[in-house]
Image (cartoon, grey):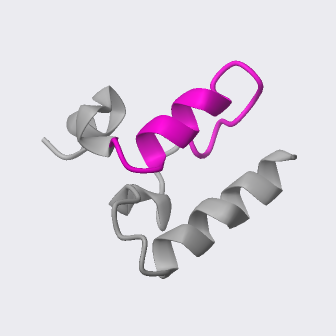
Amino acid sequence: MNEKMIGNHLNIMAKTAFRRVCPLVMEPHESCHCVNTNNLNLSAALFYCGGNYKQCSIYNRIME
């Protein structure tokens, strides 16, 4: 799965009934995990952007 496909998948999840997706997915900050998806941080993107965003240091820093 390439980066564009992952981003599209996260956007689709954000628009559907699955509302636990990070609110920043629709307009991500340049440092967000969903923007910089590669093999090293793909699991972080799925974990934090996919529902555990309140535990994400990037989300918490941006939302301060």
Q: Can residue 33 be seen in this view?
A: no
Q: Is residue 50 visible?
A: yes
Tell me where residue 30 appears, x and y as whole percent.
53, 43
Q: Give the range drawn in magenta.
A: 34-52
Which residue is pictured at 73% across the width and 53% down the height?
6
* In magenta stretch: residue 1: no
Q: In which quarter of the image is residue 5?
A: bottom right
Q: Would you say 36 lies left or right of 21 here? A: right
Which residue of the protein is positioned furthest toward the left in this rendering?
A: 64
Which residue of the protein is positioned furthest toward the bottom in this rendering?
A: 16
Which residue is pictured at 58% across the width and 45% down the height?
34
* In magenta stretch: residue 43: yes
Tell me where residue 33 appears, x and y as whole percent.
54, 37
Name above or below for residue 34 compared with residue 16.
above
Name above or below for residue 40 compared with residue 8.
above
Which residue is pictured at 38% across the width and 49% down the height?
51
Which residue is pictured at 19% across the width and 46% down the height?
63
